[in-house]
Image (cartoon, rainbow, N blue to C red):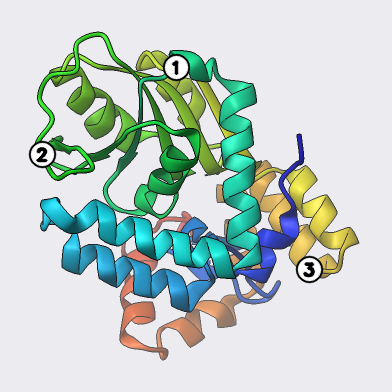
Amino acid sequence: MSTANISWLFETAALKIAPSDSPFWYTSGLIGPYYVNTQFLCGGAQKAAEVLALIDAEQDKHASFASVMAKTLDDIYATHTIYHDLIDLMVASAGTEFPIAEVDYISGGQRRDWFFAPIVAKKLNKPMLYIYNDQSIYAEDGSPVTSLPGKKVLNVADLLTVGSSYTDKWIPGLAKAGAILAYSLNGVDRLQGGVANLTAGGIEKVHSLFAIQLSLFDQALSQNYIDQGQYDMVRDYISDPFQSMRSFLVAHPEFLEKAQAADEKTQARARKLIGDDLYRLKS
């Protein structure tokens, strides 16, 4: 079976690395060296934004939504090489990593799972289940799904972080209908405890195409997608997210000064970092 190519992440900006002297601001008020936007693998940032806007506009029109999504994803698959190759790899991985003959349904959770799950379901010749944040489930014909006694489900997701969407929404939503979310296939695993949480939640096996680990950045450095300074910052962050960013702030006091004079969103995040003393700079 072919393997995932890290060029897909960098060429679509699905993985974006900050300059070594300017880490990214996260919504939490913390800072870090990278962003992961797995949905950008679906045709790039602009196309992904168009797909997300389409989802927002059409997702409650249950009778027509699946056909709209199918046409949209088929068009991107036919015209965008990276998305084409990624979907082919997801389909191949589903067949080799899981007992696919035992899988009754493919599911995807609202909203970003829907960039990938419907077309994977189609190519595996499995019916698709759309799971919404309120745990309601809809079939491809738009009908609500409330009874799936004993059915096994493979969920296809864009990103695995800690797995809270699985444990809070997808697993219990399917369980209400009597189904078992048995397997999880993800585009990217951030390696933040998601696999352990999914396993504890009853999922039998988890597989991801990419893992945000140092070996990925070793390849990125060797292929010139990042420079040595970016690599060093990522390496330190992976080793210790808190201490690495605290050390950065201590060594670069101008970073916070600039943030407090930046755009409103950055200022708000800087105020949170300082006000809540997220990096213990006052001690």
Mark 2 or 1 closer to N-term? 2
Q: Position of residue 48 (x, y in %)?
A: 43, 69
Q: Nearer the viewer, residue 171 or 278?
A: 171
- In the picture of the structure, the residue carrying the numbered disc 3 is 225
Label 2 vs label 1, nearer the camera: 2
Query: Label 3: few (<14), some or many (≥20) within 10 Å?
Result: some
- In the picture of the structure, the residue carrying the numbered disc 2 is 143
Which mark is on residue 175?
none
Label 3 vs label 2, nearer the camera: 2
Q: Residue at x 30, y 27 (%)?
A: 167
Mark 3 or 1 closer to N-term? 1
Mark 3: which secondary structure?
loop
State left or right for residue 181 relative to residue 74. left
Q: Position of residue 253 (x, y in %)?
A: 58, 77
Which mark is on residue 199?
1
Q: Position of residue 184 (x, y in %)?
A: 46, 28
Query: Label 1: few (<14), some or many (≥20) within 10 Å?
Result: some
